[in-house]
Amino acid sequence: MKSFDNKVAVITGAGSGIGRALALALGEKGCNLALVDVNEQGVKETKRELRGKGLKVTTHVADVSNEKAMKALAAEVAAAQGKINLLFNNAGITYAKSFEGHSLADWKKIIGINIWGVIYGCHFFLPYLREQEGDAHIINLSSMVAFMGPPEQTSYSTTKAAIKGFSESLWAELHPQGVGVTVVHPGAIRTAIMDEALKSAEDQSAFAKTKAMVDKMAMPADKAAKKILKAVRKDKMRVVVGLDAMFFEGAKRAMPEEIHKMFLLMPQ
Ligand code: NAD
């Protein structure tokens, strides 16, 4: 997609972090926005930050893991905005727990949001995107953990590896038909995702230390958003965001098994 001017983008998880940064960056380019989140205050704040730019910005409260809500959302956005060019399946959560520390409810919740949320998004929005063939694009947020699974990330790695495979297959189907697909593999980006994970972390004090360390090195969300939008403009199938994510990918390719031993050196 060469330009975002006068297009319509739907962003899930637009009430915080990367979703909000994408909304602000797209707003700068003249893109109209449908901001989706379970957190109503969050999307209202994002909308407030977009005031005065002459854009059509609509807010929608929906849980991406709820099939009925996602079906209704697609119709609601299409009616409110008139057309849909871009779908950012961005809403996501993570946990900081060992496999044995996860309840089955934790698994169902993260699979619901991180996998079903993306499938529902693509399923219910694709008919509208097809109406804009040649000017339509789906962007799915995976992670660097799709390349290598770290400890205490069984559920998150499962979901993000799924999104990698899903998006690559989807690209092969849709790209020749004029609907672009980009899968995004960010490294650590400074957002609220780890604050949320901290609330249910198995070892809160250890995770708080990890979070403080990661926050220092993490990329600002606005910088990540710019890299994601550049990849969409260039119609890239994939984008790896950050040196840490590039390291994860490169090291996995070079030493597919040995590299995992680095995780054994981390304090348990
Ligand atoms: P964030 O916590 O700052 O924002 C996530 C947003 O998603 C929040 O506004 C939250 O309310 C919303 N959300 C959560 N559950 C939802 C649901 N069921 N329905 C609708 N909205 C829901 O997190 P972020 O870091 O901006 O994460 C955005 C995406 O980027 C996620 O898919 C995440 O996995 C991915 N990602 C983040 C990082 C990172 O380091 N921050 C790294 C790799 C990938």
Image: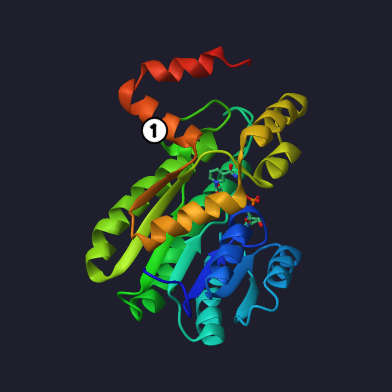
The verdict on label 1 being within 8 Å of ligand 1 is no
Q: Position of residue 260 (x, y in %)?
A: 44, 20
For disc 1, the neighbor class at 10 Å (few under 14, some 14 to 19, many from 20) is: some
User: Is 115 displayed left or right of 180 in the figure?
Assistant: right
Q: Position of residue 197 (x, y in %)?
A: 68, 40
Quadrant of the rendered image containing residue 94: top right
Compared with 59, 39 (above or below) is: above
Residue at left 40%, top 55%?
231
Q: Quadrant of the C terminus?
A: top right
- Can the viewer see residue 197 in this picture? yes
Compared with 132, 264 (above or below) is: above
User: SS class of the residue under badge 1?
Assistant: helix
Task: Give the camera-side residue of 44 and 110.
Answer: 44
Residue at left 24%, top 57%?
172
**Residue type of the residue flagged with mark 1:** Glu
Residue at left 31%, top 58%?
170
Q: Which residue is mark 1?
A: 249
Residue at left 71%, top 62%?
39
Q: Position of residue 96 (x, y in %)?
A: 64, 33
Task: Give the camera-side residue of 231 and 204.
Answer: 231
Colour option used = rainbow
Give the residue furthest to the left: 176
Q: How many marks?
A: 1
- Can the viewer see residue 148 in this picture? no
